[in-house]
Image (tube, rainbow, N blue to C red):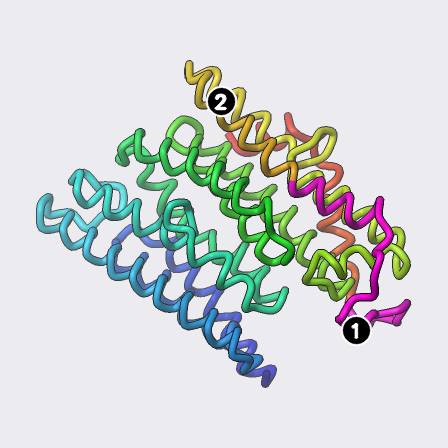
Amino acid sequence: MNPYVLMILLSSLGLGTTLTFASSHWLLAWMGLENNTLAITPLMAQHHHPRAVEATTKYFLTQATAAAMILFASTTNAWMTGEWNITDLSDPLANTMFMTALALKIGLAPMHFWMPEVMQGLDLLTGLILSTWQKLAPFALIIQTAQNIDPLLLTLLGVTSTLVGGWGGLNQTQLRKILAYSSIAHMGWMIIVIQYAPQLTLIALGTYIIMTSAAFLTLKMSLTTKLSTLATTWSKSPILTATTALVLLSLGGLPPLTGFMPKWLILQELTKQDLPIIATIMALAALISLYFYLRLCYAMTLTISPNTTNSTTPWRTQTTQTSMPLALFTMATLGLLPMTPTILMLAT
């Protein structure tokens, strides 16, 4: 892609998110979300592969549907209450419609069906943008309106997402689909606590972005998109394989890695709110997710691939990719747990 075009598209992505962050009027927030969608569409279709074009079409249609629902919900709210302010979302119908639209935008279950399919058709860097940056603007809107939305709806979306994210990833062999289901499960954790402690949602979103970035950049460094190829990476770069296993365990939420922090704090908050059953369901759903991360770790570090892979084997090739972002994200993914009190203090 032409670097000038790439610069314009990435600037538009940044502008769309910033516009949604800064807006207090519904139309301005909607414009920011539309800007985001239109900026990432050419990035998704840049390889002109039929799968990439198909993924782009699916993504565009779902995002356009969600944007239309947001516009309809905000117009309904303005019609019923006379208010266009984001924080004054008081009409119950508009509330539910708005939350459903944003759930479709970020891929919360049961509106998640587009997410694994779209992710499978993209290259790893665009998949990284879709999993991280594209979640920010909708989450800003959800956090601003969470107090007006029906708590039962938020709880249902959160629990369903963690269960679907765990179950869906169990039988996958494509790493991008596994990361898509991982994303759905993490979104569930963020949504479940948003009505009680929005600062914990921000902490969970931050750690999710760090861990997912580390996972995607690792896969890009080792040129891996399938489980069978992952089993051959140990011979190419043993150290990268070891850190990848730890990154995956951090995504699963095992102590003493960073991924344990948001799960621990969210379960603690749910227990404080006198919701032990929901806390138990969330903890058990995290175990399902942990199984497929462990499966990846096992395939990568404890087995030798019994057959040759169909893909090109990058046998100790010198990579031209920059490894500094990967190193920084991996360090953050593995070592932020001792900083929990500091992060909590900064967030509150």
Question: What is the quadrant of the N terminus in the image?
Answer: bottom right
Q: Tell whether position 300 is magenta.
A: yes
Q: CA distance from mark 2 to mark 1?
A: 45 Å
Q: Position of residue 189 (x, y in %)?
A: 49, 35
Residue 312: numbered disc? 1
Residue type at mark 2? Ala
Q: Which residues are magenta?
A: 292-321
Q: Main secondary structure of the magenta part?
A: loop
Q: Residue furthest front?
A: 306
Please tell me which residue is depicted at 20% across the width and 52% down the height of the picture.
74
Give me the residue at 75% from left, 71% from top.
Answer: 311
Name the residue nearer the viewer: 244 or 98.
244
Give the residue type that dot 1 points to: Thr
Secondary structure category for the residue under label 1:
loop
Was residue 254 drawn as part of the magenta stretch in this picture? no
Mark 2 lies on residue: 279
Residue 158 lies left or right of residue 261; in this view the side is: left
Q: Tell me the element at label 2.
A: helix
Give coordinates of residue 150: x percent, y percent.
Answer: 27, 33
- Residue at 37% of width from left, 61% of height from top? 33
Front residue of 98/87: it is 98
Examine the image and state in which quarter residue 223 appears: bottom right
